[in-house]
Image (cartoon, grey):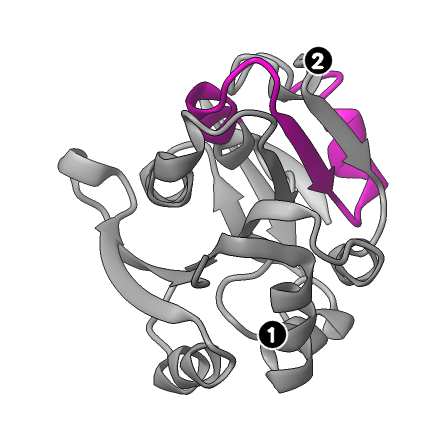
Amino acid sequence: MSLTRRDTELVIMAGGKILMSSRMHGSEEAMAEMAGKRLSSLGGACVLVGGLGLGYTLRATLDLLPADATVIVSELIPAIVEWHRGPLAALADQPTADKRVTIEVKDVIATLRSSAGRFDAILLDIDNGPEAFTESSNAGLYNDRGIATIRAALKPGGVLAVWSAWEDRRFEQRLKYAGFKVEVERVRARLKKGGPRHTIFLGRLSS
């Protein structure tokens, strides 16, 4: 994992491939908005953000939440957390400094397994889609067992949002099989400014 600057653009690379770029983050912000609509007026909301990345998903989530909310960020790579104390600090207006945020440097699967019925929303942006990319163990998030673990960590009426660079009908069907009401949205990487289309999987549980 490496952080690279190209002119004014900051890029996180994984295995020599671009994982995320500061030039395109509109779809991450859209994901947070889709998941967070019902949370803006929910007292004491608790949200899990899986993957800190460049901080745009976290910032957009915080901007939607009330002052008494709690946001747990599960980030596997310690270097990314350190970068947010340095070169990434100002990129998304220092989201990790927000008092509502607790960062857990651990695998998001471990956080989910220890958090039964804890979260009002879970936002996952740790791979380029619903398959392992940054870490092989992430594959366990997207199979039937992983989805069951996610569901168990949500409260009744909870929301799951998963960012992806592509569509995946099998993943969509697995979510439905697990009892989620599923919406799939295609969003431009730079919103109105264009860019490639990304996919947001949004799953809701009944109250």
Give the percent coordinates (x, y) of residue 48: 64, 43
The reply to whether the magenta stretch includes residue 86 is: yes
Kind of residue at badge 2: Lys
The residue at the point 74 percent across, 44 percent down is: 74
The residue at the point 33 percent across, 44 percent down is: 34
Q: Is residue 101 left or right of residue 20?
A: right
Q: Which residues are magenta?
A: 59-87
Q: CA distance from mark 1 to mark 2?
A: 30 Å
Is residue 164 in sight in this rendering? Answer: no
Q: Is residue 179 above or below residue 104?
A: below
Q: Quadrant of residue 112?
A: bottom right
The residue at the point 36 percent across, 69 percent down is: 181
Q: Earlier in the sequence, mark 1 or mark 2?
A: 2
Q: Quadrant of residue 190?
A: top left
Q: Is residue 20 left or right of residue 34?
A: right
Where disc 2 sits, the SS reads loop
Give the percent coordinates (x, y) of residue 32: 42, 39
- Circle 2 residues within 10 Å: few <14, some 14–19, many ≥20: few
- Tell me the tag on residue 99: 2
The residue at the point 41 percent across, 80 percent down is: 176
- Tell me the tag on residue 147: 1
Q: Nearer the viewer, residue 60 or 152?
A: 152
- Circle 1 residues within 10 Å: few <14, some 14–19, many ≥20: many
Kind of residue at badge 1: Ile
Give the percent coordinates (x, y) of residue 35: 41, 45
The reply to whether the magenta stretch includes residue 117 is: no
Residue, far front? 207
Q: Is residue 178 left or right of residue 32?
A: right
Q: Quadrant of residue 79?
A: top right
